[in-house]
Image (tube, rainbow, N blue to C red):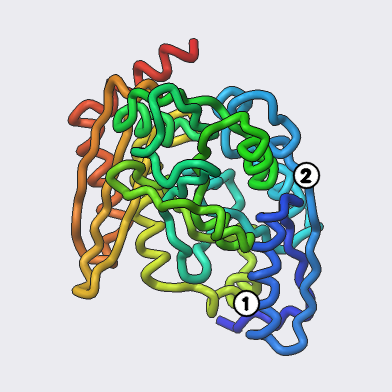
Amino acid sequence: MNAPAPIAKIVIASRESKLALVQTHMIRARLMALHAGLAVDVLGMTTQGDQILDRPLAQIGGKGLFIKELEVALADGRADLAVHSMKDMPAHLPAGFTLITVGERETPEDAFVSNRHDHLAALPKGAVVGTSSLRRECQLRLKFPHLEIRSLRGNVGTRLAKLDEGQYDAIILAAAGLRRLGLGDRIRSVLSTGDSLPAIGQGALAIEFREGRDDVAALLAPLTDDHTTAAVTAERALGATLLGSCDVPLAGHARIDAGRTLTLEGFIGLPDGSRHLRDTISGRPEEAKALGHALGERLLANGARAILDQLAAAKQ
């Protein structure tokens, strides 16, 4: 089989939020450093998820609203690849697209951001905490039932501005996004995975492109990191097994220790925290996908199916 012809120029589709563009330009710089003479343009796009900010994401169509326009650009040839935050990617891609994990993962944990308090345990009864995530809401209600959890949408700058205006006593954001934006000094503390298990894929970057683009795959191959890929593969297999979406409080976090053991922890619950399940599985990194599937099946057998049925009934 002949190797694909080298590419002279590529176009990367990206959301136009500041964080999305920072992440896209990180990938652009790495590609240009790896491939001498490669021209890389960025096609900035506004997605439906960026435009509709007055309702929780779960009510307006889910994570797919952040990627649909980018996939249209890939399909019609305006772009060769798209850079995403892996946590924004649905468990199942539309037909004709493929996805890889690129680079080493930034810290996957959630960050506590406040102007007056150092950590969640320091917040007084009735303090208002902002988050856009049902996953975070569920776990916060479990651990800190005395707090008031309110929805918070918008890009990172918008959310920080609302905190600074006094609309919230604290907000919870992904630590990775703050650090990539140079806002690590806004992090008062990082939440333990015991208090808030991260979203599937959080802290990792993904590149999506059309199936059959062997030339693009060859271009991207040097960007992959084996440990990050294995961890994210396990987490996404868990999400796919549990049919995870933004209207399901679902979390998954995989880590690989020095002994090359992959440990995957999963969580699912109801938004109010009244029901939840948490479980862990371990194995070899090469078994990542099978481990994620096995943990998902175990959670389903132990009560996750009933939780999913209750969530589905509540939507009708």
Q: Quadrant of residue 43?
A: bottom right
Residue at 37% across, 51% down: 235
Please determine whether, in this image, residue 279 is positioned above or below residue 313. below
Which of labels 2 and 1 is toward the front?
2
Question: Which amino acid lies under the numbered mark 2 shown in the image of this protein?
Answer: Thr
The part of the image, by quadrant, that contains residue 152 is top right
How packed mark 2 is, by other alpha carbons closer than 10 Å (few <14, some 14-19, many 20 or more), is some
Give the residue at mark 2. 46
Q: Secondary structure at mark 1?
A: helix
The tag earlier along the polypeptide, 2 or 1, is: 2
- Is residue 8 placed above or below 165 in the rendered structure? below
- Residue 226 position by quadrant: bottom left
Which of the pair 164/106 is nearer the observer? 164
Query: Residue 164, image x and y in percent?
Result: 64, 40
Left or right: 65 as drawn, with respect to 98: right
Q: How many marks?
A: 2
Q: Residue at x 64, y 24 (%)?
A: 55
Q: Position of residue 18 (x, y in %)?
A: 72, 54
Instruction: Determine if residue 243 is in view.
Output: no
Q: Is residue 293 left or right of residue 73?
A: left
The residue under the point 18% across, 30% down is: 302
- Which residue is depicted at the point 50% across and 63% down? 101
In the rendered image, residue 51, in percent from the top left (x then y), is placed at: 75, 35
Q: What is the residue that sits farthest to the front in this orientation? A: 116
**Label 2, label 1: how far apart the Cα atoms are:** 26 Å
The N terminus lies in quadrant: bottom right
Q: Residue 264, image x and y in percent?
A: 27, 53
Image vertical order of residue 295 relative to residue 132, above or below: below
Residue 202 seen in the current view: yes
- Which residue in the protein does label 1 denote? 219
